[in-house]
Amino acid sequence: MATLAPQPDTVYAPDPLDVSRPELYRDDTWHSPFRELRAKGGIHYTEVSDFGPYWSIANYKSIVHVESLPELYSSEAAGITIADLKEGDVRMPMFIAMDRPKHTGQRRTVAPAFTPSEMVRLSANIRARTAEVLDALPVGEGFDWVDTVSIELTTQMLAILFDFPWADRRKLTFWSDWAGDIEIAKDPVKKQERLAHLWECAAYFSQLWNAKVGKEPSPDLISMMIHSDAMSEMDQQEFLGNLILLIVGGNDTTRNSMSAYAYGLDRFPDERGKLENDPGLIANATQEIIRWQTPLAHMRRTATADAEIDGHRIRAGDKLALWYVSANRDESVFADADSIRVDRANARRHLAFGHGIHRCVGARLAELQIGILLEEMAKRRLRVNVTGEPTRVAACFVHGYKSLPVELSRY
């Protein structure tokens, strides 16, 4: 199918399978259109949407196929979200939105922060901070799990990774929320407001960078960049782009999976009971919660040449949205996919971290933080009881929660 530009005088009926609509995620009604999309083969062309024409790639097999061909389906050509850059927009290069060979060098620069040995080094600190947060929580009184637990724990971790001033750590959450909001692409006024916040972020980090120049290497991300050939000479846009990548990546995946632990297990009390009776299931349950939530709903690729996917003709320049949120509910891979099963045998096959050369570099750290949270909750025999509906992010990129009212009890 060729990509056709919308004609100015043509009235198009809304596409019921346009899964970029923000209300689907705000109201948690995305399941139905994706289920229909997968039933029809998992590949669909939406001609008109708020983000322009795009292909939905919504089944597991086809997403793995696209991710396995990074030269044909580029991350760099037009970025990694369904939102296109408009004239006048500031482009912020980041290694997740680069193709080889530049992607390889920059990814290798930060990868040492996420090795197994680094996870061992960080685990005691993560456990101590998690224990401190949990021990301060009220039992039998209402509070917001997202702000008090999920945001606090992930923001503390980001501050440690960047050697960021502790008292200012909530700035990281603020910048992450502005950077990750794909809906801002539709609003020129908010785009300018976001740009101002992001330049503030760049200025703050430039001071941290300058303070480390000429110093001995240390195990934080800024020092790693300074002491690398691939990233030491970045211009301001590229510096900011990679900061935003690491902040959003380090914040949203972990934060929204921690919230999904609280919300999801409350929805599946029998599975929660299994986990409470057998803490040996925690490692697998961590993977299952990440699968069930899928904290980033999609990534975007752009075809660099004409191609074919499962009988569908893709043209050079076409936009492909890889809907991880749908692949992780693909019934051909995950039986009873809409349910949490803490003992699911293939939970680790999820695509929440992507696949191939762009698979999330910080996946191990996200898993470690979530797993330790579950372990420390189990040690205290604490159970999260959801007391009201969550407020969800109204957008098709970050798939998460703004707030979640809960009370804790003992079991």
Image (spheres, rainbow, N blue to C red):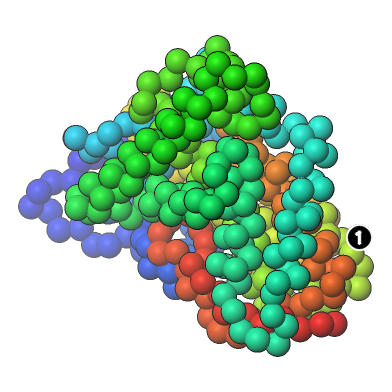
Residue 389 higher or lower than 81, as above or below: below
Percent position of residue 255, x then y = 59, 57
User: Which one is nearer the viewer's eye here, 141 or 169?
Assistant: 169
Q: Is residue 150 above or below residue 205?
A: below
Vertical order, 23 against 395 (above or below)? below
- Give the residue drawn at x 81%, y 82%: 410
What's under tag 1, amino acid-wise? Gly
- Is residue 305 visible to us here? no
Structural crowding at the residue carrying mark 1, measured as other residues with C-alpha within 10 Å and reported as few (<14), some (14–19) or many (≥20): few
Name the image quarter holding the N terminus.
Answer: top left
Query: Quick one: quadrant of the C terminus?
Result: bottom right
Residue under the image location 81 percent in, 48 percent down: 124
Q: Which of the 4 image quadrants contains residue 358? A: top right
**Disc 1 designates what residue?**
280
Q: What residue lies at 70% left-to-right and 65% top-to-bottom?
A: 133
Foreground of the two, 299 or 181: 181
**Residue 206 appears anywhere in the view:** yes
Residue 319 coordinates in the image, percent (x, y): 37, 38
Q: Is residue 202 left or right of residue 6?
A: right
Question: Horizontally, is 256 left or right of 264 in the view?
Answer: left
Q: Residue furthest top?
A: 229
Drawn side of residue 279 relative to residue 184, left or right: right
Q: Residue furthest left?
A: 9
Closer to us: 377 or 4: 377
Q: Secondary structure at mark 1?
A: helix
Residue 230: percent from left, percent from top: 53, 15
Which residue is rendered at x = 55% and y = 41% of the image? 164
Q: Position of residue 123 (x, y in %)?
A: 79, 46
- The tally of labels here is 1
